[in-house]
Amino acid sequence: MKEASAQRLNRIPEYLFKELDDLKATVRSGLIDLSEGSPDLSTPKPVLAALARALKDPENHRYPSYAGKLSCRAAVAKWYRRRFGVTLDPGSEVTMLIGSKEGAGHLIWATCDQGDVVGVCDPGYPVYANQTRLAGASVSSVPLEAENRFLPSLGWLQSIAPRLKLLCLNFPNNPTAAVADLDFYAKVVELALRHGFYVVNDNVYSELGFGRHRPPSILEVPDAKSCCLEFHSLSKTFSMAGWRIGMAVGSRKLVSALLQVKQNTDSGPFGAIQDAAAFALQSGAKLAEANRKAYERRRDVFCRELARAGWDVPKPAATFYVWARVPAQEQATGRLAAGKVPNDVEFVKEMLKDCRVLAAPGSGFGQYGRGHVRFALVADEKKLKEAAGRIGRWLKIR
């Protein structure tokens, strides 16, 4: 028989979260899984009620339109106006997605050819780099380092700007939890307009900003809509991850290109889910705030308990992730060699074996993630306190 797999599959590694699933299978009981950003909070009851009502509409059981219901796109536009002060045309600057992950993959296929260069944050959500490779384009890694608050260096972006076709950003960031401000976005847009490349910002964590942090949209920058697209989703804001409902907004050209791929690949989201999403966006500010406060409490509990155990990790300003440098065994005695990077994969495996707590290894998000781990705060406060306690006891004897 001929080879079943296309050669292009050799361009990508095994998906990170598939590997983590394999690790989970080695633990029979007592696992506290903080590896994947899959919200554990319940979808708000009013949103469930809106879905139940929408299910009774016979029209929702027909094929949905590719771009999504105009009523849902209008709700997205109104929400962007209220939340960010951004004006969008629902007819040409908004399209609904079967989750923002689908949008990311389809956008890259829609915009990039073989030989094009795509700037991808490192560490970053693996989909951007992997879909770039599958499309035959070239990945140009954009380092996110602690020295620059895990934001791309503008000098680095300036050096690669003439070669770029597309720059993929994700702020608030997965996995580092970094937050970009409008001044940073303005400089990126200025570079894009000067050098003629496009920008996509994955902004799905904007509603999980803590304290006074209200993460902005790149589309708040004047003229950004001429070169920028932004992804958003209801997955984290309203705990609707399994519903697969998101949106792409911004540049008419990019929305149109994305839709050309969607029209030949899938249909729009299920109509009843779109109706429930529109309800959530129109009426759910208090519901979203309840989720945000829950994650903030979890962050405070988990980081406090780890600090008590001697692992002082930075408190994230947004997202439900905690990004931490692996504590090396030699740190306690001062024998850690300068520049030595702890092995994050081995650390994760040891922590799973000895603590029954699973995190995601930073190297799974790129070479600049080496020596770090990412915890997702997708367990209640009691379990997070237990997880931190197990880790703390383990670190003292490790």
Image (tube, rainbow, N blue to C red):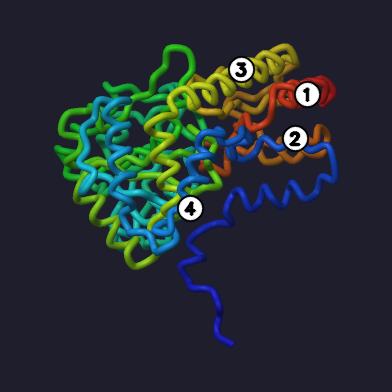
Point out the frontmost of discs 2 and 4: 4
Q: Secondary structure at mark 4?
A: loop
Give the residue drawn at x 48%, y 32%.
237
Q: Are marks 4 and 3 in contact (CB under 8 Å)?
A: no
Residue 238, above or below 16: above
Whole-Å distance between the Cαs marked 3 and 1? 15 Å
Whole-Å distance between the Cαs marked 1 and 2? 9 Å
The amino acid type found where label 3 is placed reads: Arg
Instruction: Describe residue 313's horizontal placement relative to residue 173 as left or right.
Output: right
Q: Which mark is residue 297?
A: 3
Residue 198, above or below 213: below
Q: Are marks 1 and 2 in contact (CB under 8 Å)?
A: yes
Q: Secondary structure at mark 1?
A: helix
Q: Earlier in the sequence, mark 4 or mark 1?
A: 4
Mark 2 highlights which residue?
32
Point out the frontmost of discs 3 and 1: 3
Q: Which mark is residue 386?
A: 1
Point out the frontmost of discs 4 and 1: 4
Q: Earlier in the sequence, mark 3 or mark 1?
A: 3
Q: Position of residue 116 (x, y in %)?
A: 28, 56
Q: Position of residue 65 (x, y in %)?
A: 33, 59
Q: Are marks 4 and 1 in contact (CB under 8 Å)?
A: no
Q: Position of residue 109 (x, y in %)?
A: 34, 59
Residue 161 showing in the rendered view: no
Instruction: Name the one closer to the observer, 291 or 107.
Output: 291
Give the residue drawn at x 80%, y 49%.
26
The amino acid type found where label 4 is placed reads: Lys
- Within 10 Å of the Cα at label 2, are there few (<14), some (14-19), or many (20+) other Cα atoms? many
Instruction: Name the one closer to the observer, 66 or 28.
Output: 66
The amino acid type found where label 1 is placed reads: Glu
Q: How many marks can you see?
A: 4
Give the residue drawn at x 65%, y 28%.
326
